[in-house]
Image (cartoon, rainbow, N blue to C red):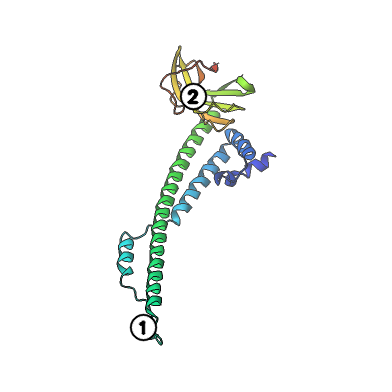
């Protein structure tokens, strides 16, 4: 896949329309391409707004109105009763009519629930897009900082990790490729090494072998970083021996 092809995948990535292989390749590309990161975040936000544009909220009185009308709806059109239906047929028609109205009510209720769900989903997507946009901007700023320094190291299982540190921005980014999936119910947690004391720097996405992570919190006086395997959700302090330790670049 060429570089030009990757630049053209921003829309497909924002709509989750890429294959797993294409998705991984494009995310590696985002680490070094600030323009694509910005365009992707904007397209994601636009997709969320389009979802909000088609969402409607049903009137709160709709359910009560339908229930009230069930008992008053006429079963025959006035002036067209050329023949009288037998009692059994008339009863059947009334029952079918009420069943139909009940089905319509159920459908309306389901539609209302679906609309509320869609609205919430769109709102969540919009918030997520904003967060992704902010994170992408911060990652790009660290990578582009004049004082950015990098250090790479081999990790277990053939994975490679690179840490990028900018003291002027007081932030660090960890970029990993080929990371094995953690055991079930576990997650990789990043840590700042503050003179031998480990300070949490956030979690890695357990479903991605290639990713760029903006380490949570300021670099401050940290001299390096570590990675441990922790229970899902992370830990306040490391509960296992680090699987990797890296010194920050000077």
In the rendered image, the residue lying farthest to the right is 2
Q: Residue at x 47, y 49 (%)?
A: 48
In this rendering, position of residue 30 left or right of residue 185: right
In the depicted structure, whether residue 35 falls above or below residue 200:
below
Mark 2 and mark 1 residues within 8 Å of each other at the beta carbon:
no
The x, y position of residue 206, in whole percent, is 53, 30
Q: Residue at x 50, y 15 (%)?
A: 241
In the rendered image, the residue lying farthest to the bottom is 82
Q: Residues within 10 Å of mark 1 (few under 14, many from 20)?
A: few
Q: Earlier in the sequence, mark 2 or mark 1?
A: 1
Q: Nearer the viewer, residue 124 or 60?
A: 60
Q: Secondary structure at mark 1?
A: loop
In the depicted structure, whether residue 38 falls above or below residue 210:
below
The x, y position of residue 199, in whole percent, is 43, 19
User: Which residue position holds label 2?
Assistant: 189
* Alpha carbons under labels 2 and 1: distance apart: 74 Å
The x, y position of residue 221, in whole percent, is 44, 16
Give the label on residue 78, or none: 1
In the rendered image, the residue lying farthest to the top is 196
Q: Quadrant of residue 195?
A: top left
Residue 154 in sight = no
């Amino acid at each position: 896949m060429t570089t030009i092809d990757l630049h053209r995948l921003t829309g497909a990535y924002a709509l989750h329309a890429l294959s797993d292989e294409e998705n991984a390749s494009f995310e590696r590309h985002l680490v070094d391409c600030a323009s694509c990161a910005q365009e992707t975040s904007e397209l994601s936000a636009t997709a969320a707004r389009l979802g909000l544009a088609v969402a409607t909220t049903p009137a709160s009185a709709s359910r009560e109105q339908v229930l009230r009308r069930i008992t008053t709806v006429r079963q025959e059109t006035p002036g067209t009763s050329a023949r009288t239906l037998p009692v059994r047929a008339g009863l059947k028609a009334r029952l079918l009519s009420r069943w139909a109205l009940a089905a319509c009510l159920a459908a309306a209720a389901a539609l209302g629930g679906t609309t509320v769900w869609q609205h919430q989903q769109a709102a969540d997507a919009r918030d997520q897009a904003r967060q992704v946009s902010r994170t992408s901007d911060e990652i790009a700023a660290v990578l582009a900082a004049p004082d950015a320094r990098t250090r790479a190291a081999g990790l277990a299982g053939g994975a490679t990790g690179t840490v990028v540190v900018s003291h002027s921005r007081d932030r660090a980014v960890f970029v990993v490729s080929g990371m094995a999936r953690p055991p079930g119910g576990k997650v990789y947690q990043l840590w700042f090494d503050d003179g031998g004391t480990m300070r949490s720097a956030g979690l890695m996405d357990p479903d991605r072998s290639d990713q760029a992570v903006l380490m949570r919190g300021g670099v401050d006086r940290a001299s390096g970083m570590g990675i441990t395997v922790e229970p899902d959700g992370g830990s306040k302090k490391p509960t296992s021996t680090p699987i990797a330790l890296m010194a920050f670049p000077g």
